[in-house]
Image (tube, rainbow, N blue to C red):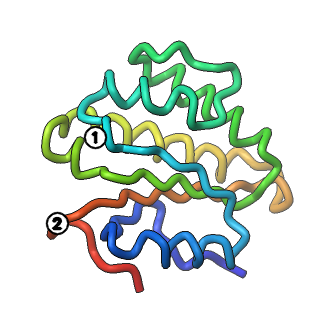
Amino acid sequence: MESRFSLINLINENNLNELLIDLSSQDFEVLEIDGDCIYDSKTFFKAVKDSLPFDPPISGKVNWDAFSDSLWEGIMNLENQKVAIVWTKAENMLNYGLGGLIDAIRALTDVSTSLYNDAENDKERVTLTIFLIGKGNNFSLHK
């Protein structure tokens, strides 16, 4: 079944449980980023270094190239063709570290695009979908 999600999705936190059920029903492997303490690039790296499947592991220092390369390899090693990154409390970075949020989204988008385009055939193709979960007018209700 083809996913009905966009590459980047903004979802209201009130719909998180519904989203997780939906992703599970579509056989997504869900990787969660707890954004409670993420306000800028430095705190983003500190939070994700142990929560995402990096191969090789990243140091936690801000290095977007290392982040992208290592995350790409780590996701390829999951052996699941549908992967979702669910980043909660994304409004923290939106409100306090917009530049870092843009850098993170750019890196995640690059990884997603590369995973999809680098596959030699459909059996190797990985779809990485990103969900920014938050509260406020920027985050719509999940349908």
Q: Disc 1 residue type?
A: Ile
Say few, some or many: other residues with alpha carbon within 10 Å of mark 1 (under 14 / 14 to 19 / 20 or more).
Answer: some
Residue 80 at x, y = what percent?
78, 55
Q: Nearer the viewer, residue 104 or 134?
A: 134
Residue at figure coordinates x 36%, y 44% from the top left: 35
Q: Is residue 41 above or below residue 38?
A: above
Q: Disc 2 residue type?
A: Gly
Residue 133 at x, y = what percent?
35, 60
Residue 41 at x, y = what percent?
31, 27
What kind of element bears circle 1? helix
Q: Nearer the viewer, residue 32 or 61?
A: 32
Label of residue 116 in the image: none
Quadrant for the N terminus in the image: bottom right
Q: Is residue 21 left or right of residue 95?
A: right
Which one is in front in this view, the residue at disc 1 or the one at disc 2? 2
Label of residue 136 in the image: 2
Q: Is residue 82 above or below residue 22?
A: above
Give the image quarter of residue 26.
bottom right
Residue sticking out furthest to the bottom: 143
- The CA distance from mark 1 to mark 2 is 18 Å
Residue at figure coordinates x 41%, y 86% from the top left: 143
Instruction: Choose the circle earlier in sequence order: 1 or 2.
Output: 1
Q: How many marks?
A: 2
Residue at which label 1 appears: 102
Give the image quarter of residue 134.
bottom left
Residue at figure coordinates x 65%, y 53% from the top left: 116
Q: Is residue 2 left or right of residue 78?
A: left
Q: Nearer the viewer, residue 7 or 140?
A: 140
Q: Is residue 52 left or right of residue 132?
A: right
What kind of element bears circle 2? loop
Q: Is residue 29 left or right of residue 46?
A: right
Residue at figure coordinates x 60%, y 71% from the top left: 23
